[in-house]
Image (tube, rainbow, N blue to C red):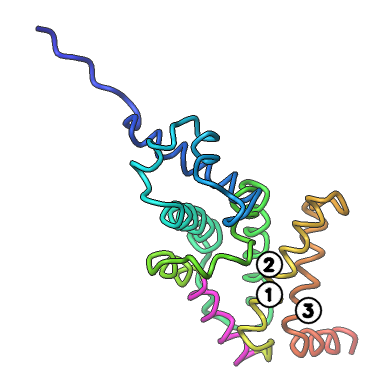
Amino acid sequence: MAEAPKRRGRPIVDDKRRRILDAALRTFAERGYHGTAVPEVATAAGVGTGTLYRYFANKEQLVNEVFRDAKTRLRTALIGEVPSLRDYQLDVAERWFADLWRRLGAFARAEPEAFRFLEMQDHAPYLDEASKHVELSVLGPLWLAGKRMRDRLGTARVDVLIALLWGAFVGLVKASRLGYLKLDDKTLEEAGDTAWKMIAPRAWRATERKTRG
């Protein structure tokens, strides 16, 4: 008997799991966690509800998998190839921040559903330990850079800094989504420049005085 040909690419089981995760991301992004029912995700994925439950025991496990999947891609986009900020002189820190800001913009454009899902504020109640670990793997390097910039450049307090920057960027994306502005490269750069001046006002003002003097 001839040997059956081997399948190429991902196994079918992985394809189904991927379809479920992608459909869940779209549905959660549109309706939120509490507004989403598991059968709706199954329908969007083109599988039966029973099939979905073979991969994910319940909605909480599903949303945590979606969160980790999206957050890991965000971490790769922001930190994966960004060089460590070792020199905290003003010009170096400013370039590092500008690069990080551009990477965030690129992620929001490339993966609008993932960004919309991650920008939601109701994640905390259902996040499990694995999801919290992924969250810390994103926040940790940014927190460290923020702390060192605060020590050297007189920036805002780190928790305030992160909240301000994330809130500002989310506001830009929402305004773009609603048609109030076009988030093109020029607008993104201008917004990033304004954000930098907001988080490092003392350092920026000192540079301005030197330039004018």
Q: Residue at x 67, y 83 (%)?
A: 160
At label 3, counting other C-alpha atoms closer than 10 Å, the crowd grade (few under 14, some 14-19, many 20 or more) is some
Q: Amino acid at mark 1?
A: Glu
Q: Circle 3 — which element?
A: helix
At label 2, counting other C-alpha atoms closer than 10 Å, the crowd grade (few under 14, some 14-19, many 20 or more) is some
**Can you tell which of label 3 and label 1 is closer to the viewer?**
3
Q: Amino acid at mark 2?
A: Ala
Mark found first going from the N terminus, 2 or 3? 2
Q: Is residue 23 above or below residue 202?
A: above
Pointer 1 residue: 94
In three-dimensional space, the C-alpha distance between marks 2 and 3, rounded to whole angstroms, equals 11 Å
Q: Circle 1 — which element?
A: helix
Instruction: Please state which of residues 188 and 210 is positioned toward the viewer in this rendering.
Output: 188
Check residue 197 in the rendering and tell me which mark sits there, or answer none.
3
Q: Amino acid at mark 3?
A: Lys
Q: Position of residue 124 (x, y in %)?
A: 53, 70
Q: Quadrant of the C terminus?
A: bottom right
- From the viewer's perspective, tell me whether residue 179 is left or right of residue 142: right
Q: Residue at x 77, y 90 (%)?
A: 202
In this picture, which residue range is highlighted in magenta? 139-152
Q: Is residue 196 above or below residue 131?
A: below
Pointer 2 residue: 98
| Marks 3 and 1 close (CB-CB < 8 Å) | no
